[in-house]
Amino acid sequence: MRALALLCATALELHAACAVARQVPPVSVGQQVRVSVPVSYIHSGRAMGVVTRATNQEIDLLVVQRRVSGTDRWRSDTLRLAVPLDSVQHLEVATARVSNSGRGFLLGAAIGGGVGLVLVGAAAAEGGAFAPTVGDIPVGGLAGALMGGVVGLVVGSLSQRTTWLVIPLARSATQVSVRPRCDGLAVSLSF
């Protein structure tokens, strides 16, 4: 029995040493974060906010938005939230705000090119003295893609999106499990 007590005490000391080894908090004050926490902290379990205090044991957030339960919508809100790091299930940090100009250009070019192909194709099918020929259809698609791309570039450059970096949460892997057996107890220690 003393050997079991010694084994459990050693495992608990290793567990404490691992916890002390991760002294650096995964986020810093002022960073924008998205967190998933148990519903006992926030009804929906997801929140977005700014870190107001960070230690190796807990983070304090000024929550500015939280997810509406059962939906993909976010609701503006203002509340303070203190969460132990062990309770955080998922953590993301905002890394940059980037322009949507590239996406806008590609989307505008695709839509404009399709519209250009259809319009020139329909005009060529009607015929007439000044109607385009079948060979002009690709030129119409290219002109539509160019105009649509320019419009998409301008509209896309007016909006931005945030890129998020998932922060791996250091979890202590030291575990002690005791199971009864027919001839005594089975103790396992995992790191």
Image (cartoon, helix red, strand yellow):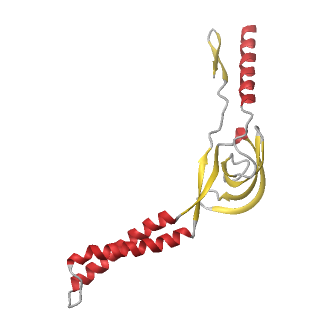
Asked whether the viewer can see residue 71, the reply is no
In the image, farthest residue toward the bottom = 129
Is the N terminus in the top left, top right, bottom left or bottom right quadrant?
A: top right
Residue 57 vs residue 188, the one in the foreground: 57
Query: What residue is drawn where x is 61% and y is 61%?
Result: 73
Query: What residue is drawn where x is 75% and y is 13%?
Result: 5
Is the C terminus in the top left, top right, bottom left or bottom right quadrant?
A: top right
* Residue 50 percent across, percent down from the top left: 73, 54
Query: What residue is drawn where x is 41% and y is 76%?
Result: 147
Residue 99 versus residue 179 in the image, above or below: below
* Residue 172 percent across, percent down from the top left: 67, 30
| 77 relative position to 152: left or right | right
Residue 122 versus residue 20 in the image, above or below: below
* Residue 84 percent across, percent down from the top left: 75, 41
Query: What residue is drawn where x is 73% and y is 56%?
Result: 63
Asked whether the viewer can see residue 19, the reply is yes
| 125 relative position to 88: left or right | left
Residue 181 vs residue 32, the one in the foreground: 32
* Residue 136 percent across, percent down from the top left: 24, 77
Residue 184 versus residue 149 in the image, above or below: above
Write down the quadrant of residue 99 in the picture. Answer: bottom right
